[in-house]
């Protein structure tokens, strides 16, 4: 006889799924779409638009097609499916979606996305966060459909970020605020590199024994320890250079949008100058990983509680170079 706890678990799981709308297994695989197809701004009529999307627990994709009207407009109703037994099993939603236009013998990708949930408009929510969208797309989102305005003059599709976790590939230019902000951030970091470098330098001034602490606290192999032991007494006496162009992110963009300050996460490499107990000079590379900064128009400041640094035995050498 199965224990009562098992039945309680099953009941709890069923109620949870019910709350999420999965109890009967019906889920959204592709949200409704309304779009316009143009060429150099002129509407294209009679163009075939094909929709393809994958289904849970099935190797066979589902597909359908429509044709643009005289104004270049097209639309698709919501596409739903059923989870069946999967609604009772732990799993990740992975739904590949595509919309392609066939024109003069060529195919144009106007939408490609991996939907990671079963919710209506989940393509744009990004783990259920309400998205920041351009005005026209925001209005469509609230009405419950995806708005796609694609012009075939742009032949190559580009990856466009709705948020830090969701990318849509398309020849259409969606102008997602997050995508634009991230591109602007890259230029801003280059322009204000000295400010970021000063903040990093100040952190090492306050933590001159950082490398010794890393050696003591972390697990290393024998050959790594052999290389690192000589630096156990070394203290950081300065910063030679900072490269923070390898990684950038705006993980709190939805929360910070419209505010005077934004939380920015950056990564890269820092070359530090070391002083040994006998006064000998050395250099080493320290890895900067997802360090969080506050950035406003007037100020850049490092959030000391959220900065992650690492060292690598292969890079802690007296002759390390940039």
Image (spheres, helix red, strand yellow):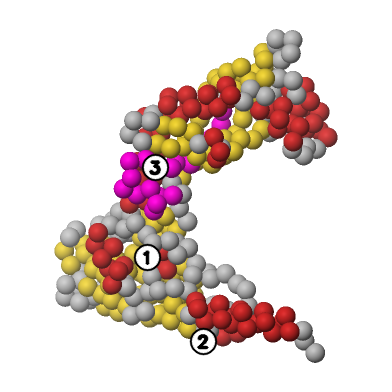
Q: Earlier in the sequence, mark 2 or mark 3?
A: 2
Q: Mark 2: which secondary structure?
A: loop
Magenta stretch encompasses residue 185? no
The answer to whether the residues at label 2 and label 1 have Cβ atoms under 8 Å apart is no
Residue 167 drawn above or below residue 34: above
Residue that label 3 marks: 262
Q: Earlier in the sequence, mark 3 or mark 1?
A: 1
Q: Position of residue 291 (x, y in %)?
A: 53, 38
Badge 3, how many Cα within 10 Å: few under 14, some, many 20+? Answer: many
The answer to whether the residues at label 3 and label 1 have Cβ atoms under 8 Å apart is no
Q: Which mark is residue 24?
A: 2
Position of 280 with respect to 155 (left or right) is right
The answer to whether the residues at label 2 and label 3 have Cβ atoms under 8 Å apart is no
Say which quarter of the image contains residue 173. bottom left
Q: Mark 1: which secondary structure?
A: strand
Q: Position of residue 284 (x, y in %)?
A: 64, 24
| Mark 2 vs mark 1: in front | 2
Q: Earlier in the sequence, mark 2 or mark 1?
A: 2
Residue extent of the magenta highlight:
252-271
Residue furthest to the top in view is: 279
Is there any visible trace of residue 179 in the rendered image? no
Tell me how far mark 3 sits from mark 1, CA to CA.
30 Å
Residue that label 1 marks: 111
Badge 2, how many Cα within 10 Å: few under 14, some, many 20+? Answer: some
Quadrant assignment for the C terminus: top right
Q: Position of residue 303 (x, y in %)?
A: 50, 36
Position of 317 with respect to 182 (left or right) is right
Q: Give the residue displayed 40% in from the left and 36% down from the top.
A: 295
């Amino acid at each position: 006889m199965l224990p009562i706890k098992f039945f309680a678990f099953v009941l709890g799981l069923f109620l949870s799924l019910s709350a999420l709308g999965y109890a009967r297994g019906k889920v959204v695989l592709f949200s409704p779409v309304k779009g316009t197809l143009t060429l150099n701004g002129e509407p294209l009529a009679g163009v075939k638009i094909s929709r393809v999307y994958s289904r849970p627990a099935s190797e066979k994709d589902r597909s359908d097609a429509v044709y643009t009207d005289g104004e270049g407009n097209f639309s698709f109703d919501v596409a739903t499916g059923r989870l069946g037994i999967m609604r009772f099993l732990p799993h990740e939603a992975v739904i590949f979606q595509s919309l392609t236009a066939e024109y003069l013998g060529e195919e144009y990708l106007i939408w490609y996305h991996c939907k990671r949930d079963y919710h209506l408009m989940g393509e744009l929510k990004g783990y259920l966060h309400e998205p920041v969208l351009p005005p026209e797309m925001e209005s469509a989102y609230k009405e419950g459909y995806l708005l796609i305005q694609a012009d075939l003059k742009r032949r190559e599709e580009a990856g466009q970020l709705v948020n830090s976790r969701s990318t849509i590939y398309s020849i259409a230019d969606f102008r997602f605020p997050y995508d634009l902000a991230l591109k602007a951030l890259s230029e801003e970091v280059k322009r204000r590199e000295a400010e970021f470098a000063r903040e990093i330098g100040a952190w090492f001034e306050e933590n001159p024994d950082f490398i010794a602490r890393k050696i003591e606290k972390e697990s290393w192999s024998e050959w790594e320890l052999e290389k690192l032991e000589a630096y156990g007494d070394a203290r950081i006496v300065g910063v030679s250079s900072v490269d923070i162009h390898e990684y950038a992110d705006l993980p709190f963009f939805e929360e910070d949008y419209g505010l005077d300050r934004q939380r920015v996460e950056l990564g890269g490499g820092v070359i530090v100058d070391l002083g040994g107990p006998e006064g000998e000079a050395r250099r080493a590379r320290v890895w900067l990983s997802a360090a969080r900064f506050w950035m406003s128009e007037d100020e850049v400041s490092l959030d000391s509680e959220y900065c992650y640094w690492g060292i690598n035995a292969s890079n802690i050498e007296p002759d390390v170079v940039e």
